[in-house]
Image (cartoon, helix red, strand yellow):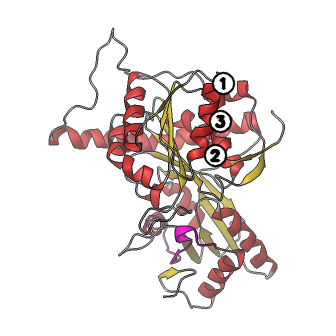
Amino acid sequence: MSNHIAINGDAAVALAWKQINPDVCAAYPITPQTIIVEKFAEYVANGEVSTEFVCVESEHSALTLCTTAASAGARTFTATASQGLAYMWEMMPIAASMRVPLIMAVANRAVSGPIDIHNDHGDVMSARDCGWVSLFAENVQEAYDMSVIAPRITEHHDVQLPGLVNLDGFILTHAIERMTPLDAEAARKFVGEYKPIYPLLDVKNPISHNLLDGPMFYFPHKYQSVLAMENALKVTEEAFRDFEKVSGRKYNIVEEYKCDDAECIAIVLGSSFGTMKEAIDQLRKEGKKVGAAMPRLFRPWPVADLAKLMKGKKTVIVMDKHLSIGSYGPMFPEVVAAALENDSMPKMYNYIFGLGGVDTMVSDFVSVFKDVAAGKAKRVNFLGVRE
């Protein structure tokens, strides 16, 4: 194990990439992701990795190149944020359907318009149905760890899907925190040698990729991705167990905080989980039986784990850092659907918060629990904005 270092989230991701030493990286700079590819480009320029780095003219080109490189049999990484991910969107379901296990770091940022460079989850939520495995980090340490773990999941022969590593823009990407990386050798050994399936450059076994599908084949091919996502749950659990052995850090499909005896729990994604924990601690001092949880794995959606979490709870509050205009927050109906696996339903409330980087303080999260307990909450609530 290496010593502690002080590093920001973007540089931590780049460090993980350096230790893994992918074959290809193609990316276009965009705030707040730029530091990832800038730092990794330094590693390339200094000869610290053997990666073929391509600075393309757009994010669409970046993902097109990465999808092609991965199809050829190369371990491939990229990174983006916000409008960059939106520009890639056309290629995202294509990459998933081609079953290429490339990795993309997403520095989560609000999507225009209006133009805003600060954090919310509007970018990754627009990609939630594209067929990519999706992991979330709470802090800089986790941004590094998820970047090391992600290839173990996506490259598994029972999965073979692209993957997203999400870290909140500026809150994690630019904040310097203390973290403990693995030794480079340990990281490389954990990730393992890349063994592509059906690579295009295997000229002795020629194949075709991404051909036209008619109705008879399109649906069955999509269903294969469904089965791969189901496999990803078990594979992720195995990867987390193996990572704990080499790092001492334990991760779960759904992270829980003081939920065992809680009557009311809040479910939240990303760095806000840390803020929510402090709110829970304050409310616990007041005698309130409350808890919090974060789906570490957002895709595949961990239905069984969430259903187990919510069993016997009186109230569940779903905190969404994105708004599906004209409907609920994107996570709320999925949490409700997971609760349906149980015999009884808790009372369910949805809170939209933090859009465009609006600060959400511990006191704000405390007020959410108190408003729900006092019967002041509606089904959908907007925290920090006048309704």
State the residue position of label 2. Answer: 10
Residue 98 placement: quadrant: top left
Camera-side mark, 3 or 1: 1
In primary-sequence order, the first of circles 2 and 3 is: 2
Residue located at (56% from left, 56% from top): 305
Picture coordinates of residue 309 (x, y %)?
59, 63
Label 3 crowding class (10 Å Cα cut-off): few <14, some 14-19, many 20+? many
Residue 59 placement: quadrant: top left
Residue furthest right in the image: 3
In primary-sequence order, the first of circles 2 and 1 is: 2
The type of residue carrying mark 1 is Asn
Measured Cα–Cα span from mark 2 to mark 3: 10 Å
Q: Is residue 380 left or right of residue 362?
A: left
In primary-sequence order, the first of circles 3 and 1 is: 3
The type of residue carrying mark 3 is Ala
| Residue 145 in sight | no
Measured Cα–Cα span from mark 3 to mark 1: 16 Å
Q: Which residues are magenta?
A: 339-359
Camera-side mark, 2 or 1: 1
The type of residue carrying mark 2 is Asp
Tag 2 and tag 1, C-beta contact below 8 Å: no
State the residue position of label 1. Answer: 46
Measured Cα–Cα span from mark 2 to mark 1: 19 Å
